[in-house]
Amino acid sequence: MAPAEILDGKVVSAQVRGRLKSQVTQMREQVPGFRPGLAILQVGDRDDSNLYISTKLKAAEEIGIRATHIKLPRTSTEAEVLKCITSLNEDPTVHGLLVQLPLDAEKTINTELVTNTIAPEKDVDGLTSISAGKLARGDLGDCFIPCTPKGCLELIKETDNEKPNGRRVVGDVAYNEAKEKASYITPVPGGVGPMTVAMLMQSTVESAKHFLEKSVPGKWNIQYNHLSLKTPVPSDIEISRSCTPKPIGYLAKEIGLLSEEVEMYGQTKAKVLLSTLERLKHQPDGKYVVVTGITPTPLGEGKSTTTIGLVQALGAHLHQNVFACVRQPSQGPTFGIKGGAAGGGYSQVVPMEEFNLHLTGDIHAITAANNLVAAAIDARIFHELTQTDKALFNRLVPSVNGVRKFSDIQVRRLTRLGIEKDDPATLTDEEINRFVRLDIDPETITWQRVLDTNDRFLRKITIGQSPTEKGHTRTTQFDISVASEIMAVLALTSSLEDMRERLGKMVVASSKKGEPISTEDLGVSGALTVLMKDAVKPNLMQTLEGTPVFVHAGPFANIAHGNSSIIADRIALKLVGPEGFVVTEAGFGADIGMEKFFNIKCRYSGLRPHVVVLVATIRALKMHGGGPTVTAGIPLPKDYIEENLELLEKGFCNLDKQIQNARVFGIPVVVAVNAFKTDSQAEVQLVIRLAKEAGAFDAVKCTHWAEGGQGAVALAQAVQRASQAPSHFQLLYDVQLPVVDKIRIIAQKIYGADDIELLPEAQHKVEVYTKQGFGNLPICMAKTHLSLSHDPEKKGVPTGFVLPIRDIRASVGAGFLYPLVGTMSTMPGLPTRPCFYDIDLDPVSEQVNGLF
């Protein structure tokens, strides 16, 4: 009998690799930028494993597969190995994953558990129990076959022919003896080994093909919730409870977040880590849309509802990647007069109780941090007034085991003072004096205590009345927590490092020599960062229809800048990808929230918006046209529920002015007419026609309150079209202009004022802040939201007024100056009948009742 014919695995594997290389080239031509990915996880440093892995890496490179070798040390724990596998499971660029066996670990690691943690769809080695089970059942089309037997099968295919008398392979046995008997035999080495590697590559390419087949690159694989609409529309809380939200971890996975980037807060909300930005830094941004409105009235315009309705329409109905980015509501209005801020009707963030109450504690963190600064200010004044320089120094730099040492923050203070010393014993008496004495002028303190409750009796208080304070009393006040500069810092920061720097820059007072005193001077800025370390992470929630929402930061719009965080917007823009949309909301009317969105938020973020959505209602426009006063608890006058085209056309002037305000910045404007059932078709068409004549890119009727996303599809389509239109974004003013000029530009171009008037205190502050080097900051006007002017009673488009500026304060850490216009208060008060009359807890079901 003739000796066995040599079946050379090297030759056959080379043919397989050649086919695979062609397939990979074809895939990359069809989907630019795509490349099959293989990850090889190794624990330890065995020589044989290193040899096998190098062979696999070389084969992958030849074929065009992106291969990654992850090498964990021998000291790795089982938990560390499992965490690494989970991360690779979730990485969309990895299509094949194998763990090199045996594990070379010092600690005991359950190999079966490790193997079975690999996602079945990435188990290209075919070693998980799921793959083995499918193989045993014969589900060959739905599993990966282990590479060595698969290589043998491939060799058999190479030798089979289709004739009835075709030859058959006996297999590998004792080589020298078997080759005299067998028809075919594989050499050692060079037989099955190369085929095993080739089959690993083939399985990886197959997995990559499956990935492309079931996913459109850039599109989320997301499940939307179907709404069961009811007529009449139930209360917001009833609708919220009728929906079963997706587990928040499931939503996070749907939108491309890794498990290591998500911190769960129960089943319905989570925080997203800032590391997401680093991972996605090369991902192009999506389209950026800001929702604003006409000047608000007690009748409500529905900006939040429109924001949510729009994202539901873009996501659940037009199948676009889309994110809503909204502010976290303050407890003040929630229990005061406004109620919740989760949207309404069938366009809500859910669960609304979680959204409106505490969320993940960000506002509490701000309250704690803010009041720590306030306590530090008064304590420092007290201690400086009651101690000598030496006593102060001994306490500020205490001797520990006979050694005095400056803390890091104290070293930075010495550097700012020009004292380049790090040994406390070397300071002169004059240097000690300068180091220990902030010499705060109590009359210049601008930092207030805060509370997240509307409490009018805290607008002016006296502190220090205890006998222990030795008569050192002073008059001060409380602000609402969301008016704290720390909230503004949270909203405008770009990273943890940036937040640390901004928190340190916050100016709280001036010294008696007129020098600014910062939180860094007080030594408290590091502690503030610690208190805010979790608050800086955006909160992930969802809409009724299952689209993602970031709820992050909540600065008041008429006191602070009224926009959610830059960080949330940036992460969302990366997650949605270049064809997706991020819809963010700017508080109150376009003259306030939108102006600050552009001139402050976009100035710092560098992001450029594509579309402005301007929300208006028929009945609110009628009020701007001179309609009768609306009183809570009393039925609406007939002008608001019956057709009145004349009154409506008069009130259109406010919408017209806000359209012009948006166009000043060079961005296309889409008007959303938020329709009520009492609005006539003629009224809606009148507003649409006038809006287009006024320069709006488009104007559409919306019914998302009653119909959810379906009622905002026309709006979503208009936004899509507008996002493709040419735009020429520009800021309103140059920050290098004098402070007064910047205020005047806003007052005249946005509000329509004839001029501004600086009262003596405001004029003094202009001089102080300019001298201290803060004159080049942008301007954040603290003005009533109820009118384009400073008088809340003046509706429509007031003219012929001079805008009074009573004071100016500096938020140096946040990065703006904020003039106080007219009688604007930074601490709201409770109405006669607050919302809390209706809020209660069912002790049996633990449901919150009374929110709306």
Image: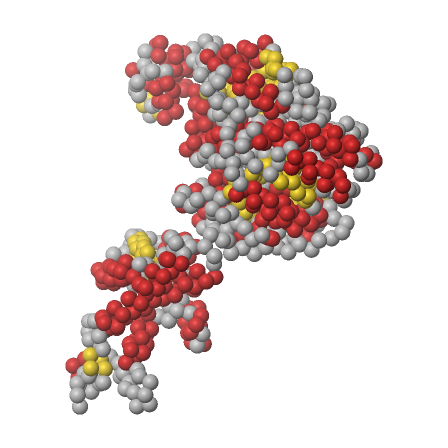
| Residue at left offset 49%, top offset 44% | 286
Q: Nearer the viewer, residue 286 or 79?
A: 286
Q: Quadrant of residue 302?
A: top right
Q: Is residue 440 above or below residue 145?
A: above
Q: Is residue 68 above or below residue 687?
A: below
Question: In the drawing, does residue 229 fall left or right of residue 498?
Answer: right
Location of the C terminus by quadrant is top right
Q: Is residue 363 visible?
A: no
Residue positioned most to the front: 693
Q: Nearer the viewer, residue 322 or 97?
A: 322
| Residue at left offset 36%, top offset 26% | 408
Q: Quadrant of residue 617?
A: top right
Q: Nearer the viewer, residue 679 or 52?
A: 679
How far across and how far down the image is residue 801, in percent? 67, 17
Question: In the drawing, does residue 695 fall left or right of residue 128?
Answer: right
How far across and how far down the image is residue 528, in percent? 47, 29
Q: Quadrant of residue 389?
A: top left
Q: Is residue 174 above or below residue 364?
A: below
| Residue at left offset 61%, top offset 15% | 755
Q: Is residue 716 above or below residue 165?
A: above
How far across and how far down the image is residue 108, in percent? 34, 59
Q: Nearer the viewer, residue 758 or 330?
A: 758
Question: In the drawing, does residue 491 fall left or right of residue 670?
Answer: left
How far across and how far down the image is residue 191, in percent? 23, 73
Q: How is the image coloured?
A: secondary structure
